[in-house]
Structures are given as C-alpha cells and as structure tokens.
Image: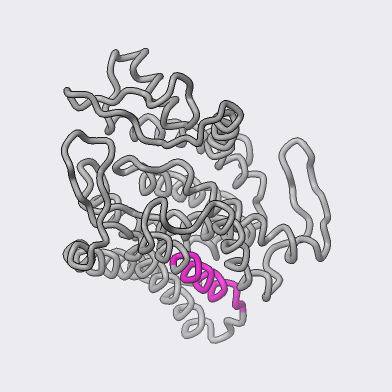
Amino acid sequence: MIPVIGFISIIAVSSLITYLFLSWWIKTAPMIGLVGKDLNKNEDRRVPEAGGLSVIMGASFGIMLSIAYNVYLSNSFSDITLLAIVSLLLLSGFLGFIDDVTGWKKGLSPVKRILFTMPIALPLVIIKSGYSVIDLPLVGPVDLGVLYPLVVVPIGVMGASNAFNMIAGYNGLEAGQALVISLFTLAFCYIKGLFFLIPLLLSMISATLILLLYNKYPAKVFPGNTFTYSFGAFYAAIVITGNFEKFGITMFSLYFLELTLFLRGLLNGVYKENFGIPQPDGSLSPPYEKAYSVTHLAIITLRRLLGKAYEKQVTLLIITWQAVIGTICLLLYT
C-alpha cells in the first residue's frame, strides 16, 4: 500500500519532470523546425509541436515511482501490468512523435495510423491483461475467452488512440479533455475501490495539468499526435486493466459522435477539418454549411446562443460537454 507521502511524491515527480522537459522543449522545438501554425487565428502564429513528449516522460516516471513503492514497501510486488502500461505509453508516444515530425498531412495516412496503432497493444496482449468477461452498454456481461486479449484489447487500444486524436486543433482542447476524462475516471476508481489504478491516473493528471498550463489559449505549445495517441492508448489500458469497459466507452461518447459526424461528411463528399474560419474580430465561423465535427457543432451552438464563437469558448464548451458526460457516467455506474 502506497502511503500518503507516496502519492504526493508521485504527483510531484510527474509534475516536475513534465515542467522541466516542456520548458526545454518549447525552446528547442523551433530550433529544429518542429513548429505548426495556429490555424484558428488571423495572425501567422507558429507554435512548438509535440509537447505531449513531456507528458509521456512525466507520467512514465510517476508510474515507475509507484511501482518502486510497491516493490520496496511490500517486497512482494509481482504484477507486471503497470510496467506493461508504461511500455504501451512509450510505444504510442513514439508513434505519435513520428507522425508529428513528418508533418501535418504529410505523416501517417489514416490507414497506416490504424494499422500501426494495433501493435501498440502488444504489452497488454503479452501479459494477457484484462478480463474475458466484459459488461457492454445495452448488452450486459459477455465472456469472450481468449478473444479478449488477442482481439478486443488491440482493437480497444487502436480505437481509443485514434478516437482521441479526432477532436483536436483548438488551444487547450486535447489537454483539457484528457484532464477531465482522467479526473472523472479517478473518482470512479476511488468509489469502486480500484486503488491500484489511482497512482497511474494521478501521474497522468499531474503531467497533463502542466501541459494544459502551456497549451491553454494562447498556446505556447501544441500537444501534437504524440499526446493524443499516447493518452488514448493509456486510457484504453486503464479501462481494460480495471475491467470497466461500460464506463470507459460511455466516457468516450463525444468521440462516437465525432465519428458519426465524420462519416456524415464523407457521405456528403467532405473530408472535414476541425478548424473554424477566423473572422476580423477574432471570432470563428463554421467551415462548412453542416456540422461534420464536434468542434463545428460547438461553433454553431455558440453563434446561435451568443451571436459569436471564439476559440476559448469553443474549447470550454466541448470540455463542459465532456464534464456532463463524466457526471452522467458516475451517476449510472457507481
């Protein structure tokens, strides 16, 4: 059992490593040309990419510290699940970083992203992580046997890592979404007594909070696919390990909506972009006549309610929707 001081040190280590790495990265990325245009603004702002590297570093060290506490305090730690999750986090971050380095629209194609994110689940597959009996929404308990680790786990990791990458492109959005999802999941795990997952979530929450401080409007760094792939895969690993698929799937409701809107766009011959169209006063207008993304839906909603939609408002509204979903999940599943 990790003592209170242990949890405090996990938070401190994750936060400090993320802060130190991110401070260095913000200065270094422009020197190697790893910057991207902030597309929701009129001016030509160039912002360092791949800030998610800092989160991977901070969260990984925080998780490893929690492993060390278990090993040295209980002297009987034999569960390799946490090491598998660290491996998965590093693998997914590496894939995302490759995508960031090769450039937006020049990196991995959608098909390659799907194919390459499947092997990320290997650390979980190898240790046969999770439980074959899962509780699915509208279906109930289903025993999948060996198909669970060999088929469901890779599909779950692939789906979550790619899904979390779909709602992005606004200052503070990806980091804010990850923070809210992690906080509600932390509450769920505490209520359900899944205490072994709490150090992992605290590590991710601490690291993500530091990233958000630099990614909030106006962003000093972008999370990049380095962050979105790794957080999506990490969250899938948490859900699989804790055996709360119903909660995890419902928490990703916005991403299922995003997929539906994306498919709607394809049917209308539109391969959508999430970004709005900046206006002279700094507000945003929707890029299409119809909503093909949750971000478009947020812009349209704000314009109808307030007359105008600004980037900060779009981010805040989507995060608020996520918080509402999180509240509903806690009411339904605890």
Between 41 and 157, the residue placed more toward the observer is 41
- Which of the colour schemes (rainbow, by chain, secondary structure, one colour) is used? one colour
Count the marks: 0
In the image, 102: left or right of 241?
A: left
Q: Is residue 16 magenta?
A: no
The residue shown at (63%, 40%) is 333
Q: Position of residue 262 (x, y in %)?
A: 55, 34
Between 45 and 125, the residue placed more toward the observer is 45
Q: Quadrant of residue 146?
A: bottom right
The residue shown at (25%, 64%) is 22
Q: Where is 231 relative to 329, above or below?
A: below
Point out the image quarter for the C terminus.
Answer: top right
Q: Where is 219 relative to 20, above or below?
A: above
Q: Is residue 90 magenta?
A: yes
In the image, 154: left or right of 212?
A: right
- Is residue 282 visible in the rendered image? The answer is yes
Q: Position of residue 134 (x, y in %)?
A: 75, 52
- Provide the major secondary structure of the magenta segment: helix
Q: Quadrant of residue 196?
A: bottom right
Q: Position of residue 82 (x, y in %)?
A: 54, 72
In the image, 225: left or right of 243?
A: left
Magenta stretch?
A: 79-93
The residue shown at (46%, 50%) is 182
